Image (spheres, coloured by chain):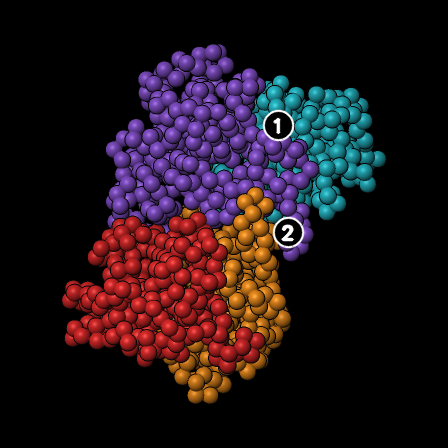
Chain colours: A orange, B purple, C cyan, D red
Amino acid sequence: MKKVLTSLEEAAKFVKDGDLVTTGGATFHRAPMELVRELVRQGKKNLNLVDREPALDFDLLIGAGCVAKIRAGMLAFEVFGLAPNFRKKSEAGEIITKEGACQPIIAGFRAAAMGLPSLPVKGMLGSDLLEISEVIGGYKQVEDPFTGEKMIAVRAIEPDVAVIHVQKADEYGNIRIEGPVYEDVIKAKAAKVVVVTAEELIPTSEFRKMPEATTLPHFIVDAVVESQKGAYPCSCFNYYDADYDHIKDYLKAAAEDQFKEYLNNYVYGRKTDE
Amino acid sequence: MKKVLTSLEEAAKFVKDGDLVTTGGATFHRAPMELVRELVRQGKKNLNLVDREPALDFDLLIGAGCVAKIRAGMLAFEVFGLAPNFRKKSEAGEIITKEGACQPIIAGFRAAAMGLPSLPVKGMLGSDLLEISEVIGGYKQVEDPFTGEKMIAVRAIEPDVAVIHVQKADEYGNIRIEGPVYEDVIKAKAAKVVVVTAEELIPTSEFRKMPEATTLPHFIVDAVVESQKGAYPCSCFNYYDADYDHIKDYLKAAAEDQFKEYLNNYVYGRKTDE
Amino acid sequence: MNDTVDVPGLMIYAMASEIKNFDTVLHGVSSPLPVLAMSVARNTHAPDMGYISGAEGVDPVVDRIYPSSFDTRQNRNAVAYFGLHEAFDLAQRGELDVMFLGAAQIDRYGNTNLSVIGDIDRPKIQLPGGAASAFLMPITPKVVIWITRHSNRVFVDKVDFVTGQGYNNRSEEYKKNEVVVVSNLGVMNFKNPDRAMQIQSYHPGHTVDEIKEKTGFDVRVVPDVAETPVPGPEVIDFINNIDPDGVRWTEFR
Amino acid sequence: MNDTVDVPGLMIYAMASEIKNFDTVLHGVSSPLPVLAMSVARNTHAPDMGYISGAEGVDPVVDRIYPSSFDTRQNRNAVAYFGLHEAFDLAQRGELDVMFLGAAQIDRYGNTNLSVIGDIDRPKIQLPGGAASAFLMPITPKVVIWITRHSNRVFVDKVDFVTGQGYNNRSEEYKKNEVVVVSNLGVMNFKNPDRAMQIQSYHPGHTVDEIKEKTGFDVRVVPDVAETPVPGPEVIDFINNIDPDGVRWTEFR
């Protein structure tokens, strides 16, 4: 079944207000930025975001007022410091922050990917993160049925939509990720709907030439759209590096109360640094 | 650390009498046959074998008297029918057969690979396989701590040794499997010791040229030895196909009480069909 | 009986008919008939199906089958690899639509035995084992059981051992999932409130009475029972082309 | 103080010294010092270590570091990719030997806070989050905490929030695992029966008294406390070569 769409507009419509959404990539690498910008342009509301270590993608959605809740292992801008909109809105109580930890978030995605209601993880015991489990949701102390070992069961995290940017896709939804994969395969399998933006659409015959390079087969994917520089200013391995100068400009705009101008320039106005 | 060995003899010594052993591949494909033959030559005893769908490798070890117990989802010779030595010794009560099912065996390996004491699976309920759990070991009915869903927890299966035949390896234990991987990655991560036989030893520089093709990094692997045609008469993708005629000869030898002759010819005598 | 259509051809066509377009379908080990049925389906009414080979290739061009259903030559031109553990995850998510399973014995509620004839602790006949049956039987939306030797030693009143769970051994949730049995004599389903086996169609050259006689329990008959549809010559040609060695006949010997 | 060795160089060398040859080591996000420490170790005393980059490359040739510790250019010439979920599985199996973690606050038992200053429900300062801390702190054989601003606002009597578990918040089993703190003033460990923080060494140009003064609790001192070993010029050259932009200084500003 052909799943290729002709526009980002269509692709972004798979995300509904209030949805639980996760994004591919990690920090400044292979985040689906162009689709994130389209979500902002479409004025999505009350999104519930979850990821292991997001950065710009989540902070932009938060800054643009699209987000109600966030759950992440860490949300920061690497050595550049705290995520500005996340920090601002979290401290102002305008978004609900449910801090997780990387492994439970991965385990929650994995449980959903495996079709299990939950999955236990080690570690975690003794952290105050467990004491705020009413806020976090989805943690319970359990004992292994065989060994009695105390562990934390993490409830499955099944996103309504996973949005993933990849290097190559065909019109049926077969996709190829080059370089690090992060949790993208797990997220795609966990999510109800998988929306893929791709640097390049390539013929299916190219997939048939090297099936070992295929990251996900078509039956996992729901929609595909071409999006050149779709991760910009994040990196896309084999295509372009992260634009750290742009990221610094973003931080400056957020710090100097010029975030609306940033949005006008780079999101609504679709200006690029190129 | 260089992990390359100069002989199969050394590699086979990683397997001790009484060990819980699993082998890579599935049915007639990429089974580590040459190392299996070496285990027979070294007269291993009381091995405890576990795998999802083994075939010739397990049946040969059983026929040669190396095996005390076996746990498999299915042990047969594809369209050629039942596994002759397995059937004979099982019906004679000379080996203990602990029939599992593919998914619980995979789940047991996965639990060990993930460092978890057990992992739940769906299905299974209502099968008599659960009623022989005293024999099988390692099943317990559990309820999910969040949803209450009844599932079967499978105890982790941590083999003492996983023996895996691959296409390419370097002297440090980086390995590349071409084509289907089966549960080989899971088994290797689950096992205490991983012994790899490889069609070819290639320089590490070749791995560095295409890290995306590396199946397992060196820190998972304990020993590597070159073994050309190491899967024969099973197939090794990109190198050779299964020799179904040889497999039929094996069946004939077992059926006509000429199995000792087969062992003399093809195992002790190292005769090949080539 | 149509001269040009042999029993494997009839069974393969009936099995292929159970696949709908867009279904995601898996076959397992020792499965020449399922491999051929999946290939027929994909080349006829289900071009958009997700074809997951037991040999791990996705949507391969199967131009030849071999004595092993895991033969990697059956992965030729696959678009991807997809491991069995990944396919099983799909099944646990309810997203594996159709699976083909075998049986050495089957009863009126669809319980299957692939484990032992006689006692499990000291088997009279050690069977090969159930493979995926105990896992996939209850949870898969549609399971197609193929049986090449329909007799009252196979279709029994009570299986010696329940490997795969029939409807009387399932939770309510899983009773809604479908089981279809395709034998060398006809096609049986369980689409009635009791979830008891009933004859849906008899193959050309066979009759309802013959099937009843060769079934070791009181098998029901659907009111509109009919002859099993016969594949056209193009389907038979297709099968002959990819199985010139007659691997599909092995299970009938 | 040795003129040629700056504080990042000292810290990197001290962190590298915590890695033994054959160790399997992982770094996470926002980790220029750990990336440099791992590279130093591999190029000096630990050539056989398993180097798992947060960017997923195994044993890459790190010829340059970047503002993001996940920058894929840091995977150059890797022998393999190894995902974080795979590295975490290793950790659950007890086979990840060393991990580097940060902290905004730390107390005498090694509890770390990366979550909030103030109240969790209405934070005064929303911190970035603990990432892998709560998971890896207890179960990893050795955790190295690096802190670039040693003061009594960071080394506190009681952390506002326990993100990573100190010894008083661990089961007996995990109390045997080691925590080492490398700050801009010295190196601290917990190798005493109480598992309480003690000064192991002070960096050149600093003193035990200074560290005590800048620590918000009664930090102990090991009897054989000494000056932190200083790296040779070849180590400093190595660091300068792969960090010409001075990314390592970012955390000190």
Of C141 and B34, nearer the camera is B34
Q: Quadrant of the C terminus of chain C?
A: top right
Q: Residue at x 27, y 38 (%)?
A: B4
Residue D13 versus residue C210 in the image, above or below: below
Q: Can residue A57 be seen in this view?
A: no
Q: Which mark is residue D81?
A: none
Can you give x and y, in whole percent of width and height, for residue B139 in the image?
Answer: 59, 39
> Dot 1: what SS?
loop
Can you give x and y, in whole percent of width and height, for residue A214 in the image?
Answer: 45, 51
The residue tagged 1 is C115
Can you give x and y, in whole percent of width and height, for residue A39 in the image?
Answer: 55, 73
Q: Quadrant of the N terminus of chain C?
A: top right
Q: Give the Cα distance between marks 1 and 2.
A: 29 Å
Q: Which residue is drawn at 27% across and 61% down?
A: D16
The residue tagged 2 is B144
Amino acid type shown at disc 2 = Asp
Name the subunit of mark 1. Answer: C
Residue B266 versus residue A66 in the image, above or below: above
Amino acid type shown at disc 1 = Ser
Can you give x and y, in whole percent of width and height, for residue A202 in the image?
Answer: 44, 57
Horizontal side, residue C212 vs residue B37: left or right: right
Residue D116 versus residue C97 in the image, above or below: below
Pointer 1 and pointer 2 on the same chain:
no
Residue B269 versus residue C184 in the image, above or below: above
